Amino acid sequence: MPTVFVTGANRGLGFEHVKQYAHKGWKIIACARNPDQADQLLDLQNKYGESFIIEQLDVTNHDSIDNLANNYQGMAIDVLINNAGILGPEGMPGAMEYQKIDNMDYEIWRTIIEVNLLSPFKVATAFHDHIASSKKKILVMMSSDLGSVAQNNFGGLYPYRASKSGLNIIAKGMASDWKDIITIALAPGWCKTYLGGDTAEVEADDSVENQQNMFETLKPENSGMFLDRFGKEVAW
């Protein structure tokens, strides 16, 4: 069976990915910062048994990332979804208040950069060989339309936008350095999750269904692209 590795799997899009892939019969490695409190993940583990693995992982702890990669040395990971991300201490719309041009919390900005930019780089580099040894060889950097410079026509959300734009450039660079895997930056749409808020346009399960269908169409020539959930290119 194929294997998927997902960070930030305890809620939102990450949870939907492990839920839907488990239903398809995949082997799951679901990472969460506090697994003991991730009741929905634990329910899935009880349902799917040994094919559903939950790992404790704080993506800001680089030693823990290395240790986890070593624990899975020799295991092929078909799809790695670098999903863990934050808007700060609040989701939308509250997160907009401390990310304004005239009301900026720089400590929150530093934390957002650590989680959304440095951590996925570290996870990707630690697990590159696992991905390269698989059949599908897919690395997904979970970005956002808010990381598009071309689409930034209303300002605000400076830390989050900067972190996702940075993630895009990392994905592009990895595609140049790593010819043995397919690396994409992904804009999943404005989804109804804790981060996206209740007024978002897209249901999380619908977005993930579209994403997973799109992953199956990826080819080596797609590496380095910024794609939406349907596989359409997003403007940088």
Image (cartoon, helix red, strand yellow):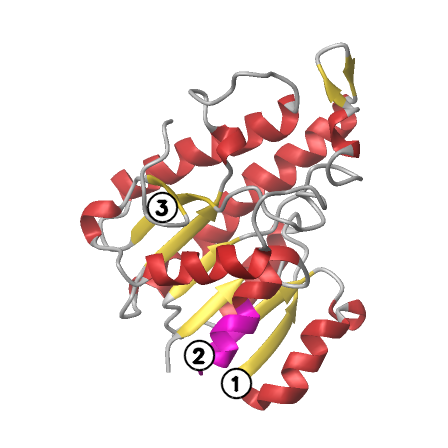
Q: Which residues are magenta?
A: 18-29
Tell me the tag on residue 26: 2
Tell me the tag on residue 215: none
- Dividing the picture into quarters, in which one does residue 146 lie? top right
Task: Say which residue appears at 63% left-offset and 74% top-offset.
Answer: 54
| Relative height, residue 58 to residue 158 (above, below) | below
Q: For mark 3, what is the residue?
A: 184
Which sits in the foreground, 74 or 28?
28
Q: Position of residue 158 (x, y in %)?
A: 63, 21
Which sits in the foreground, 57 or 209?
209
Task: Say which residue appears at 52% left-offset and 33% top-offset.
Answer: 164
Answer yes or no: do the residues labelled 3 and 1 have beta carbons within 8 Å? no
| Marks 2 and 3, the one that precedes in the sequence | 2
| Marks 3 and 1, the one that precedes in the sequence | 1
> Around disc 3, counting alpha carbons within 10 Å, would you say few (fewer than 14), some (14 to 19), or many (20 or more)?
many
Answer yes or no: do the residues labelled 2 and 1 have beta carbons within 8 Å? yes
Q: CA distance from mark 2 to mark 3?
A: 21 Å
Q: For mark 1, what is the residue?
A: 51
Q: Is residue 94 magenta?
A: no
Q: CA distance from mark 3 to mark 1?
A: 26 Å
Q: CA distance from mark 2 to mark 1?
A: 7 Å
What amino acid is at disc 2? Trp
What amino acid is at disc 3? Ile
Task: Say which residue appears at 37% left-offset and 34% top-offset.
Answer: 234
Q: Position of residue 141 (x, y in %)?
A: 45, 47
What amino acid is at disc 1? Ser
